[in-house]
Image (tube, helix red, strand yellow):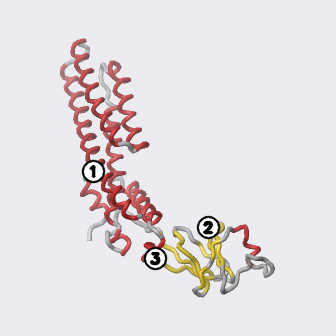
Protein backbone atom coordinates (compact mmCIF):
# COMPACT_ATOMS: atom_id res chain seq x y z
CA UNK A 1 0.00 0.00 0.00
CA UNK A 2 1.13 3.57 -0.72
CA UNK A 3 1.99 6.12 1.94
CA UNK A 4 -0.04 9.30 2.32
CA UNK A 5 2.90 11.28 0.93
CA UNK A 6 2.77 9.25 -2.28
CA UNK A 7 -0.98 9.73 -2.64
CA UNK A 8 -0.69 13.48 -2.08
CA UNK A 9 2.20 13.85 -4.51
CA UNK A 10 0.06 12.09 -7.12
CA UNK A 11 -2.09 15.23 -6.97
CA UNK A 12 0.39 18.07 -6.44
CA UNK A 13 3.79 16.71 -7.42
CA UNK A 14 6.89 16.48 -5.26
CA UNK A 15 6.37 18.11 -1.87
CA UNK A 16 9.25 18.44 0.59
CA UNK A 17 7.64 20.16 3.60
CA UNK A 18 6.70 16.94 5.37
CA UNK A 19 6.38 18.66 8.75
CA UNK A 20 3.54 20.82 7.43
CA UNK A 21 2.11 17.80 5.66
CA UNK A 22 1.95 15.85 8.92
CA UNK A 23 0.04 18.72 10.54
CA UNK A 24 -2.46 18.88 7.67
CA UNK A 25 -3.02 15.13 7.70
CA UNK A 26 -3.81 15.25 11.40
CA UNK A 27 -6.12 18.22 10.87
CA UNK A 28 -7.96 16.19 8.24
CA UNK A 29 -8.33 13.23 10.60
CA UNK A 30 -9.71 15.49 13.32
CA UNK A 31 -12.19 17.06 10.90
CA UNK A 32 -13.50 13.64 9.89
CA UNK A 33 -13.94 12.45 13.49
CA UNK A 34 -15.61 15.71 14.53
CA UNK A 35 -18.00 15.62 11.57
CA UNK A 36 -19.18 12.02 11.81
CA UNK A 37 -22.34 11.25 13.75
CA UNK A 38 -22.05 9.32 17.03
CA UNK A 39 -23.71 6.32 15.38
CA UNK A 40 -21.09 6.17 12.64
CA UNK A 41 -18.26 6.74 15.11
CA UNK A 42 -19.25 3.57 16.97
CA UNK A 43 -17.57 1.55 14.22
CA UNK A 44 -14.19 2.97 15.27
CA UNK A 45 -14.83 3.30 19.01
CA UNK A 46 -12.87 1.90 21.93
CA UNK A 47 -13.63 1.52 25.65
CA UNK A 48 -11.78 3.62 28.22
CA UNK A 49 -12.03 2.49 31.84
CA UNK A 50 -12.47 4.95 34.67
CA UNK A 51 -11.38 2.97 37.75
CA UNK A 52 -12.80 5.65 40.03
CA UNK A 53 -10.32 8.50 39.73
CA UNK A 54 -11.12 9.58 36.18
CA UNK A 55 -9.56 8.68 32.84
CA UNK A 56 -7.71 10.95 30.42
CA UNK A 57 -9.65 11.65 27.26
CA UNK A 58 -6.93 13.62 25.47
CA UNK A 59 -7.09 12.97 21.73
CA UNK A 60 -10.51 11.29 21.91
CA UNK A 61 -13.99 12.28 20.87
CA UNK A 62 -16.38 10.95 23.50
CA UNK A 63 -19.51 9.16 22.32
CA UNK A 64 -21.17 8.02 25.56
CA UNK A 65 -20.53 6.52 29.00
CA UNK A 66 -22.00 3.70 31.06
CA UNK A 67 -21.75 1.88 34.39
CA UNK A 68 -22.08 -1.89 34.03
CA UNK A 69 -23.99 -1.22 30.77
CA UNK A 70 -26.42 1.18 32.42
CA UNK A 71 -26.26 4.37 30.36
CA UNK A 72 -24.75 7.32 32.22
CA UNK A 73 -26.15 10.84 31.99
CA UNK A 74 -23.70 13.64 31.14
CA UNK A 75 -23.79 16.41 33.74
CA UNK A 76 -21.82 19.58 34.37
CA UNK A 77 -18.63 19.18 36.39
CA UNK A 78 -19.99 21.69 38.91
CA UNK A 79 -22.44 19.00 40.07
CA UNK A 80 -19.69 16.53 41.04
CA UNK A 81 -20.27 16.91 44.79
CA UNK A 82 -23.98 16.26 44.38
CA UNK A 83 -23.34 12.97 42.58
CA UNK A 84 -22.12 11.38 45.82
CA UNK A 85 -24.69 13.07 48.09
CA UNK A 86 -27.50 10.59 48.80
CA UNK A 87 -29.79 13.50 49.70
CA UNK A 88 -29.36 15.13 46.29
CA UNK A 89 -31.60 14.66 43.29
CA UNK A 90 -28.36 14.27 41.31
CA UNK A 91 -27.15 11.32 43.41
CA UNK A 92 -25.69 8.73 41.06
CA UNK A 93 -26.46 5.03 41.50
CA UNK A 94 -25.46 1.93 39.56
CA UNK A 95 -28.89 1.95 37.94
CA UNK A 96 -28.82 5.69 37.30
CA UNK A 97 -25.15 6.59 36.72
CA UNK A 98 -23.77 9.93 35.66
CA UNK A 99 -20.57 11.25 34.17
CA UNK A 100 -18.81 14.53 33.56
CA UNK A 101 -15.64 15.98 32.03
CA UNK A 102 -13.21 18.10 34.00
CA UNK A 103 -9.64 19.20 33.19
CA UNK A 104 -9.14 16.75 30.37
CA UNK A 105 -10.47 13.72 32.23
CA UNK A 106 -13.81 11.89 32.25
CA UNK A 107 -15.38 10.67 35.49
CA UNK A 108 -18.17 8.10 35.84
CA UNK A 109 -20.26 7.79 39.01
CA UNK A 110 -20.70 5.84 41.15
CA UNK A 111 -17.13 4.55 41.58
CA UNK A 112 -16.05 4.65 37.96
CA UNK A 113 -17.31 3.10 34.77
CA UNK A 114 -16.68 2.98 31.04
CA UNK A 115 -16.23 5.73 28.48
CA UNK A 116 -16.91 4.89 24.83
CA UNK A 117 -14.76 7.06 22.60
CA UNK A 118 -13.16 7.30 19.17
CA UNK A 119 -9.50 8.27 19.02
CA UNK A 120 -8.38 11.01 16.68
CA UNK A 121 -6.05 9.26 14.22
CA UNK A 122 -2.32 9.97 14.33
CA UNK A 123 -1.35 10.35 10.67
CA UNK A 124 2.00 11.27 9.16
CA UNK A 125 3.24 11.44 5.60
CA UNK A 126 4.82 7.99 6.06
CA UNK A 127 1.62 6.37 7.34
CA UNK A 128 0.44 3.64 5.01
CA UNK A 129 -3.00 4.43 3.63
CA UNK A 130 -5.56 1.80 4.56
CA UNK A 131 -3.46 0.52 7.46
CA UNK A 132 -6.49 0.87 9.74
CA UNK A 133 -10.19 0.61 9.00
CA UNK A 134 -10.62 4.32 9.68
CA UNK A 135 -7.87 5.30 7.24
CA UNK A 136 -9.25 2.89 4.66
CA UNK A 137 -12.74 4.35 4.92
CA UNK A 138 -11.69 8.02 4.83
CA UNK A 139 -8.50 7.95 2.77
CA UNK A 140 -9.89 10.13 -0.03
CA UNK A 141 -11.04 13.06 2.08
CA UNK A 142 -7.84 13.06 4.17
CA UNK A 143 -5.63 13.05 1.07
CA UNK A 144 -7.64 15.76 -0.68
CA UNK A 145 -7.60 18.06 2.36
CA UNK A 146 -3.83 17.79 2.75
CA UNK A 147 -3.35 18.22 -1.00
CA UNK A 148 -5.33 21.47 -0.97
CA UNK A 149 -3.19 22.83 1.82
CA UNK A 150 -0.08 21.82 -0.10
CA UNK A 151 -1.33 23.64 -3.19
CA UNK A 152 -1.94 26.79 -1.16
CA UNK A 153 1.65 26.66 0.03
CA UNK A 154 2.88 26.20 -3.54
CA UNK A 155 0.85 29.21 -4.66
CA UNK A 156 2.24 31.39 -1.88
CA UNK A 157 5.76 30.26 -2.81
CA UNK A 158 5.23 31.41 -6.41
CA UNK A 159 3.80 34.72 -5.20
CA UNK A 160 6.90 35.18 -3.05
CA UNK A 161 9.10 34.57 -6.09
CA UNK A 162 7.35 37.28 -8.08
CA UNK A 163 7.28 39.84 -5.28
CA UNK A 164 10.96 39.27 -4.51
CA UNK A 165 12.13 39.98 -8.06
CA UNK A 166 14.58 42.85 -8.30
CA UNK A 167 15.11 44.89 -11.43
CA UNK A 168 16.20 48.40 -12.40
CA UNK A 169 12.76 49.89 -13.04
CA UNK A 170 10.98 48.02 -10.29
CA UNK A 171 9.52 51.21 -8.80
CA UNK A 172 7.39 51.72 -11.91
CA UNK A 173 5.12 48.76 -11.18
CA UNK A 174 6.07 47.49 -7.71
CA UNK A 175 3.18 49.06 -5.83
CA UNK A 176 0.58 48.17 -8.42
CA UNK A 177 1.55 44.54 -8.95
CA UNK A 178 2.56 43.56 -5.43
CA UNK A 179 -0.70 44.97 -4.06
CA UNK A 180 -2.62 42.67 -6.38
CA UNK A 181 -0.47 39.69 -5.46
CA UNK A 182 -1.03 40.39 -1.78
CA UNK A 183 -4.78 40.32 -2.38
CA UNK A 184 -4.43 36.94 -4.10
CA UNK A 185 -2.60 35.57 -1.07
CA UNK A 186 -5.40 36.83 1.18
CA UNK A 187 -8.12 35.23 -0.93
CA UNK A 188 -6.50 31.82 -1.11
CA UNK A 189 -4.85 31.58 2.29
CA UNK A 190 -7.30 33.39 4.57
CA UNK A 191 -10.63 33.59 2.79
CA UNK A 192 -10.20 30.38 0.75
CA UNK A 193 -12.16 32.15 -2.02
CA UNK A 194 -10.78 30.51 -5.13
CA UNK A 195 -13.08 32.29 -7.58
CA UNK A 196 -11.96 35.72 -6.40
CA UNK A 197 -8.36 34.54 -6.48
CA UNK A 198 -8.75 33.34 -10.05
CA UNK A 199 -10.24 36.67 -11.08
CA UNK A 200 -7.43 38.53 -9.35
CA UNK A 201 -4.87 36.41 -11.22
CA UNK A 202 -6.43 37.66 -14.45
CA UNK A 203 -6.17 41.24 -13.24
CA UNK A 204 -2.51 40.79 -12.36
CA UNK A 205 -1.76 39.36 -15.78
CA UNK A 206 -3.44 42.34 -17.47
CA UNK A 207 -1.61 44.83 -15.26
CA UNK A 208 1.71 43.16 -15.99
CA UNK A 209 1.03 43.44 -19.69
CA UNK A 210 0.11 47.12 -19.31
CA UNK A 211 3.20 47.77 -17.23
CA UNK A 212 5.37 46.07 -19.82
CA UNK A 213 4.04 48.36 -22.54
CA UNK A 214 4.55 51.46 -20.42
CA UNK A 215 8.10 50.46 -19.61
CA UNK A 216 8.89 49.76 -23.26
CA UNK A 217 7.48 53.14 -24.26
CA UNK A 218 9.43 54.95 -21.56
CA UNK A 219 12.68 53.31 -22.65
CA UNK A 220 13.64 52.77 -19.01
CA UNK A 221 14.20 49.03 -19.27
CA UNK A 222 16.83 47.39 -21.41
CA UNK A 223 15.64 44.54 -23.59
CA UNK A 224 17.55 41.77 -21.81
CA UNK A 225 16.27 42.78 -18.37
CA UNK A 226 12.74 43.11 -19.68
CA UNK A 227 12.75 39.67 -21.24
CA UNK A 228 14.20 38.04 -18.13
CA UNK A 229 11.68 39.71 -15.83
CA UNK A 230 8.72 38.97 -18.11
CA UNK A 231 9.71 35.33 -18.46
CA UNK A 232 10.03 34.78 -14.72
CA UNK A 233 6.77 36.51 -13.92
CA UNK A 234 4.78 34.74 -16.62
CA UNK A 235 6.21 31.37 -15.55
CA UNK A 236 5.13 31.92 -11.95
CA UNK A 237 1.71 33.20 -12.98
CA UNK A 238 1.19 30.16 -15.19
CA UNK A 239 2.01 27.92 -12.25
CA UNK A 240 -0.34 29.86 -9.99
CA UNK A 241 -3.16 29.56 -12.49
CA UNK A 242 -2.54 25.84 -12.84
CA UNK A 243 -2.48 25.38 -9.07
CA UNK A 244 -5.69 27.36 -8.66
CA UNK A 245 -7.47 25.28 -11.27
CA UNK A 246 -6.53 22.06 -9.48
CA UNK A 247 -7.38 23.65 -6.14
CA UNK A 248 -10.88 24.41 -7.38
CA UNK A 249 -11.37 20.82 -8.53
CA UNK A 250 -10.14 19.37 -5.25
CA UNK A 251 -12.24 21.83 -3.26
CA UNK A 252 -15.40 20.67 -5.05
CA UNK A 253 -14.53 17.03 -4.32
CA UNK A 254 -13.74 17.82 -0.70
CA UNK A 255 -17.08 19.55 -0.14
CA UNK A 256 -18.92 16.54 -1.61
CA UNK A 257 -17.01 14.07 0.58
CA UNK A 258 -17.44 16.23 3.68
CA UNK A 259 -21.19 16.43 3.02
CA UNK A 260 -21.30 12.64 2.85
CA UNK A 261 -19.96 12.39 6.39
CA UNK A 262 -22.90 14.20 7.94
Rendered residue at 31%/39% (across/down): 158
Query: Are there few (<14), some (14-19), or many (20+) residues within 10 Å of tag 3?
Result: some
Residue 183 percent location from the top left of the image = 39, 34
Q: Are marks 2 and 3 in contact (CB under 8 Å)?
A: no
Q: Percent position (x, y) of residue 224? A: 19, 23
Mark 1: give few (<14), some (14-19) or many (20+) Cα within 10 Å.
few
Mark 1 and mark 2 residues within 8 Å of each other at the beta carbon:
no
Neighbour tally class for label 2: few under 14, some 14-19, many 20 plus, Cα within 10 Å: few
Q: Is residue 88 left or right of residue 23?
A: right
Q: Residue 184's image quarter?
A: top left
Mark found first going from the N terminus, 1 or 3: 3
3D distance between C-alphas at marks 1 and 2: 39 Å
How many numbered marks, from 0 up? 3
Q: Rounded to the nearest whole Å, what is the CA distance between mark 2 and mark 3?
A: 21 Å
Q: Position of residue 108 (x, y in %)?
A: 65, 78
Quarter of the figure with residue 94:
bottom right
Of the numbered discs 2 and 3, the one sitting upstream in the chain is: 3
Q: Nearer the viewer, residue 105 or 95?
A: 95
Q: Which mark is residue 15?
A: none
| Mark drawn on residue 104 | 2
In front of the other: label 1 or label 2? 1
The mark found on residue 42 in the picture is 3
Q: Which residue is mark 1?
A: 249
Amino acid sequence: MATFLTLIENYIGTFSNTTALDNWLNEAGHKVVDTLSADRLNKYATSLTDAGSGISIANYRIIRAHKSNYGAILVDASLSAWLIDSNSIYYATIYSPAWYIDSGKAYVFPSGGTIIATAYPAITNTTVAGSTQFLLDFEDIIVIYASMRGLLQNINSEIAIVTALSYTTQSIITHDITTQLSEIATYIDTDADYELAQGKIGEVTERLNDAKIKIEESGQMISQEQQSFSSLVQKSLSKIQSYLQLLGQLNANYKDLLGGLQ
